[in-house]
Image (cartoon, grey):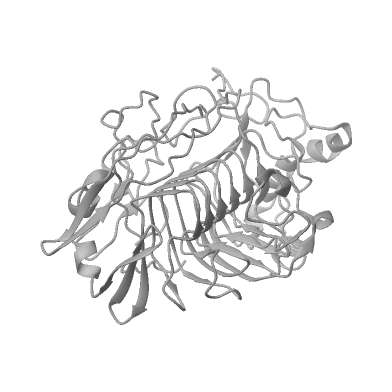
């Protein structure tokens, strides 16, 4: 994996705020365990200012308009722990274990994660990988070790499947449009060398009660996609938590196609910015193509090239992005037009505590086309040498040699003082002073913040547990 250069980035000073998120009936914070629930609330924002240095002050305007809360789906992904293992849930935590790439592939037959094939015609294929009794009370799958598409040891039969490492490549899970509606727990493990040709991600669609958590994708290669997508998910209506991807997405087609060729779930986006009969469908994001749900505490180190709506993390966002960042080079054939952003190609939702830390051929904003709300989020585009152009909410703010000003805080001080608040309202009390979030590690005075997580469950979150960010 390449080393991240933490000398460029979108910096966020989060103001007093409560953010509405997609909910499944309670609260969630930890990256361990099978219980995944949330609480939704309407966001509140105020104006503030964030000092960069003794001689510079950035005034952060009150965002307008304030979006409505995201509706709460009626569902709950709460497994009932057992005292002993059952079937393919060896540790009794309510999650079916994935230890081979064949088992990962078999998830496509079981959208609700209960250990049963969704349709009779899927039963034989599912049983060939998960034979025996179904898992009573299971609500999803968990990756119990890291897997690598190029490693024979990641396959059940010990032989690399060439069709997954070369053309035609991986077929996205739920590419039929049905969508994953359960929990996929990565446990901090990684999947390496995912190759996608003319397709749209590890998962094609994650539905409103679906969750992907604690998963890393390393050295993704995605190319020649007509519809675009994202390395992890094409269409996300659920939640992505504590996850990341590295690699590149190249040569995405930008030609308009007709409605009859729409990818599964595209019509659900209902974007007023796109024509209904003929439009460029190439919406490309480093992690997620279309986000209608919530992405929290996640990042990418991706070079992304091509598409009409292109972003380092998300191509098109009408949901929520909380505490995330993207690095890498962002480019497109549509240079100079709206829809090309460092973090998000187009934003109709809410972005909080997010930054872009990459490079592009031209100064680039956080969101290329923004009709939503961006709360104190920054794009610092690399120009040349140590020179940067800072954008805030789509407007040029400052330029010059500012990297030292923006790297110098090593805690929740200065420009980061307002990050130490309740960003996601996970406790459901609409009070930004309770349930304080602590997503960031600030490193030393020459580094930008990195995300941290408690993957090993020892009660201490560190950035070292969360991919190679430095």
The residue sitting at 74% across, 42% down in the picture is 108
Residue closer to the observer: 148 or 373: 373
Q: Quadrant of residue 131?
A: top right
Q: Quick one: which residue is furthest to the right in this view?
A: 121
Is 355 above or below relative to 85?
Answer: below
Residue 299 appears in the figure: yes
Q: Is residue 168 left or right of residue 354?
A: right
Percent position of residue 293, x then y: 55, 40
Residue closer to the observer: 458 or 389: 389
Percent position of residue 403, x then y: 25, 69
Q: Quick one: which residue is furthest to the left in this view?
A: 54
The quarter of the picture where the C terminus appears is bottom left
Q: Quadrant of residue 261?
A: bottom right
Percent position of residue 334, x then y: 59, 73
Residue closer to the observer: 26 or 104: 26
Q: Quick one: which residue is furthest to the bottom in this view?
A: 385
Q: Is residue 267 left or right of residue 364?
A: right
Percent position of residue 395, x then y: 37, 63
The residue sitting at 72% across, 68% down in the picture is 166
The residue sitting at 30% across, 82% down in the picture is 385
Residue 409 appears in the figure: no
Q: Is residue 200 left or right of residue 189?
A: right
Q: Quick one: which residue is furthest to the front in this view?
A: 64
Q: Is residue 55 left or right of residue 112?
A: left
């Amino acid at each position: 994996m390449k080393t991240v250069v933490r000398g460029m980035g979108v910096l966020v000073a989060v103001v007093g705020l409560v953010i509405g998120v997609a909910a499944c009936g309670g609260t969630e914070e930890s990256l361990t365990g099978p219980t995944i629930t949330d609480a939704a609330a309407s966001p509140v924002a105020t104006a503030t200012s964030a000092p960069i240095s003794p001689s510079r002050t950035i005034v952060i305007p009150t965002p307008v308009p304030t979006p409505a809360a995201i509706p709460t789906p009626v569902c709950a992904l709460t497994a009932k722990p057992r005292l002993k293992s059952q079937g393919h849930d060896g540790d009794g935590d309510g999650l079916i274990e994935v230890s081979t790439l064949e088992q990962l592939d078999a998830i496509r037959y079981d959208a609700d994660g209960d250990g049963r094939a969704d349709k009779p015609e899927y039963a034989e294929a599912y049983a060939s990988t998960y034979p025996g009794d179904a898992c009573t009370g299971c609500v999803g799958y968990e990756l119990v070790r890291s897997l690598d598409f190029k490693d024979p040891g990641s396959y059940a039969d010990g032989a690399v499947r060439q069709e997954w490492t070369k053309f035609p490549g991986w077929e996205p899970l739920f590419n039929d449009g049905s969508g994953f509606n359960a929990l996929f727990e990565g446990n901090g493990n990684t999947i390496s060398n995912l190759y996608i040709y003319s397709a749209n991600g590890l998962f094609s669609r994650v539905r409103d009660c679906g969750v992907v958590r604690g998963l890393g994708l390393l050295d993704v290669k995605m190319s020649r996609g007509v519809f675009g997508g994202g390395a992890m998910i094409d269409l996300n209506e659920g939640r992505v938590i504590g996850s990341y991807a590295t690699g590149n997405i190249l040569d995405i087609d930008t030609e308009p196609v007709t409605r009859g060729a729409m990818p599964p779930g595209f019509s659900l986006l209902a974007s007023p910015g796109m024509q209904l009969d003929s439009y460029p469908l190439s919406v490309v994001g480093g992690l997620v193509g279309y986000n209608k749900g919530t992405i929290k505490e996640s990042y990418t180190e991706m070079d992304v090239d091509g598409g009409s709506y292109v972003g380092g993390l998300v191509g098109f966002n009408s949901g929520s992005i909380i505490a995330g960042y993207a690095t890498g080079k962002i480019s497109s054939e549509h240079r100079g037009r709206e829809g090309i952003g460092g973090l998000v190609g187009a934003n109709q939702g809410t972005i909080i505590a997010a930054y872009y830390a990459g490079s592009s051929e031209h100064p680039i904003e956080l969101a290329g086309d923004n009709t939503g709300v961006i709360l104190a989020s920054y794009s610092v585009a690399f120009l040349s040498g140590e020179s940067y152009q800072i954008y805030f909410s789509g407007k040029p703010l400052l330029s010059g040699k500012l990297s030292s000003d923006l790297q110098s805080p090593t805690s929740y001080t200065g420009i980061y003082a307002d990050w130490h608040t309740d960003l996601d309202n996970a406790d459901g009390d609409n009070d930004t002073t309770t349930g304080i979030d602590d997503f960031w590690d600030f490193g030393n005075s020459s580094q930008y913040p990195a995300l941290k997580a408690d993957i090993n469950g020892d009660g201490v979150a560190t950035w070292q547990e969360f991919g190679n960010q430095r």
